[in-house]
Image (cartoon, rainbow, N blue to C red):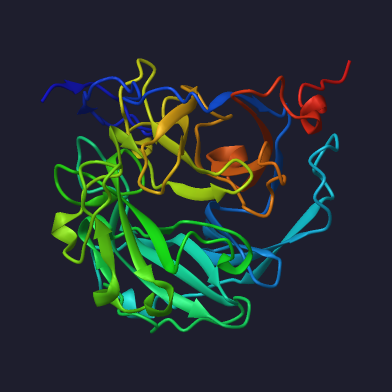
């Protein structure tokens, strides 16, 4: 394998594998024709990750990592008014920390392979919050040093996140390529779900069968009856080579990718947009200036802060995924973890809010409005008429 020379933040040698350039291997969508982002982004909170769920109490709950002196905490977003047609979104919502440390880390204190934990997925089902947690280290492959998801588990809360049962599942409920569990989001309290299953995506590397926070190869898809979400034996996994003929297996070794982008698959979030009848996914990973995959901790600033954003739509949770947007230098400092709160989507599905986080100034709850133009639409929706606004 060829390597490329690289210097780290403190002048140390940080060479990395020279993988093929990051060119998305997907057909362009003929359903979503164009995307328009608001000029402005709005920042609040602190931290990164931000898995989000629309809860039964009508609030949004989200998990954040690596802030306030803790590896992980839980936040509540209260929507004061949903006004996608307004010039700004400041004052339209408030975000407050609910729980500064939902999971006690004392049980991990003896594990030398674990450097910390982060929130991977969050889901409200009928008033119960299910928070999937991942245990990580921050790179154990010198020539491609990605944040390694070692194992994961699920904790639950019945009081809006104020307290959690951290023994709801064993700590190694998921491991290997299933270590990072990201729940598929539907409507309020999981209303509007396609069936009686909970679905979740698992980012993984197909070559070493491990899971990473960035620059994976693929996503696997699991599902479980929602009443048995905490029973590991009840989970099954998508095991088909064709989206037209879905098949499921209880054997995780038989799981097949539902999305594959070599060394460029992030720890992605997926939501269902009922207004347009499509599943939407934002994908991120990091690249060098020549567009070769390169993990964020493999080099120093400013070269460390170049990420690629690609957006996809599909008619089913397992695809087929088609590309409708690409940005090879996303955000201010290399942003990541794009997500779309299902509460913040207009009824016709054309206007959404995208939540993300990133390095440096973007290391928080970043919100940006986004409009879609579908095939057959004469123009973007009227709510987006101010998206291009610039003073003067």
Q: Is residue 352 left or right of residue 297?
A: right
Above or below: residue 140 compared with residue 299: below
Front residue (pair 46, 83): 83
Residue 308 can be seen in this image: no
Where residue 35 sits, quadrant-wise, is top right
Above or below: residue 240 compared with residue 120: above
Image quadrant for the N terminus? top left
Q: Residue furthest left?
A: 1
Taking the spot 29% from the left edge, 69% from the top edge, the residue there is 235
Front residue (pair 55, 274): 274
Q: Is residue 365 left or right of residue 143?
A: right
Taking the spot 80% from the left edge, 33% from the top edge, the residue there is 383
Q: Residue 51, how many percent across, how many down?
A: 52, 56
Q: Residue furthest right?
A: 392
Q: Residue 267, how many percent across, how many down?
A: 39, 47
Taking the spot 14% from the left edge, 58% from the top edge, the residue there is 253
Image quadrant for the C terminus? top right
């Amino acid at each position: 394998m060829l390597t490329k020379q690289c210097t780290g933040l403190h002048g140390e040698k940080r060479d990395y594998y020279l993988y093929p350039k990051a060119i998305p291997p997907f057909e362009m969508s003929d359903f979503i024709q164009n995307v328009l982002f608001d000029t402005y982004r709005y920042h609040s909170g602190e931290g990164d990750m931000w898995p989000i769920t629309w809860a039964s109490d009508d609030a949004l709950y989200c998990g954040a990592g690596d802030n306030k002196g803790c590896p992980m905490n839980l936040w509540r977003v209260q929507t004061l008014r949903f006004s996608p047609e307004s010039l700004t979104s400041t004052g339209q919502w408030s975000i407050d920390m609910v729980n500064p440390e939902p999971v006690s880390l004392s049980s991990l204190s003896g594990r030398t392979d674990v450097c910390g934990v982060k929130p991977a997925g969050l889901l409200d089902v009928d008033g119960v919050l299910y928070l999937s947690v991942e245990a990580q280290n921050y790179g154990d492959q010198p020539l491609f040093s990605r944040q390694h998801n070692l194992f994961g588990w699920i904790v639950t809360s019945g009081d809006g996140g104020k307290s959690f049962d951290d023994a709801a599942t064993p700590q190694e409920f998921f491991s290997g390529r299933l270590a990072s569990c990201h729940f598929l989001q539907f409507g309020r309290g999981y209303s509007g779900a396609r069936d009686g299953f909970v679905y979740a995506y698992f980012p993984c590397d197909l070559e070493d069968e491990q899971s990473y926070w960035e620059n994976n190869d693929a996503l696997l898809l699991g599902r479980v009856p929602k009443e048995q979400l905490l029973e590991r034996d009840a989970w099954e996994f998508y095991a088909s080579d064709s989206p037209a003929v879905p098949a499921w297996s209880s054997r995780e070794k038989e799981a097949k990718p539902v999305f594959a982008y070599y060394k460029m698959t992030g720890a992605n979030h997926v939501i269902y947009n009922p207004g347009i009848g499509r599943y939407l996914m934002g994908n991120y990973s990091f690249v060098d200036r020549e567009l070769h995959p390169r993990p964020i901790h493999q080099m120093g600033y400013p070269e460390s802060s170049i990420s690629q954003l690609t957006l996809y739509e599909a008619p089913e949770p397992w695809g087929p995924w088609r590309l409708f947007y690409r940005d090879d230098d996303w955000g201010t400092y290399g942003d990541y973890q794009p997500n779309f709160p299902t509460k913040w989507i207009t009824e016709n599905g054309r206007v959404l809010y995208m939540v993300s986080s990133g390095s440096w100034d973007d290391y928080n709850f970043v919100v940006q409005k986004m409009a879609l133009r579908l095939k057959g639409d004469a123009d973007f929706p009227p709510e987006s008429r101010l998206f291009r606004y610039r003073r003067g």
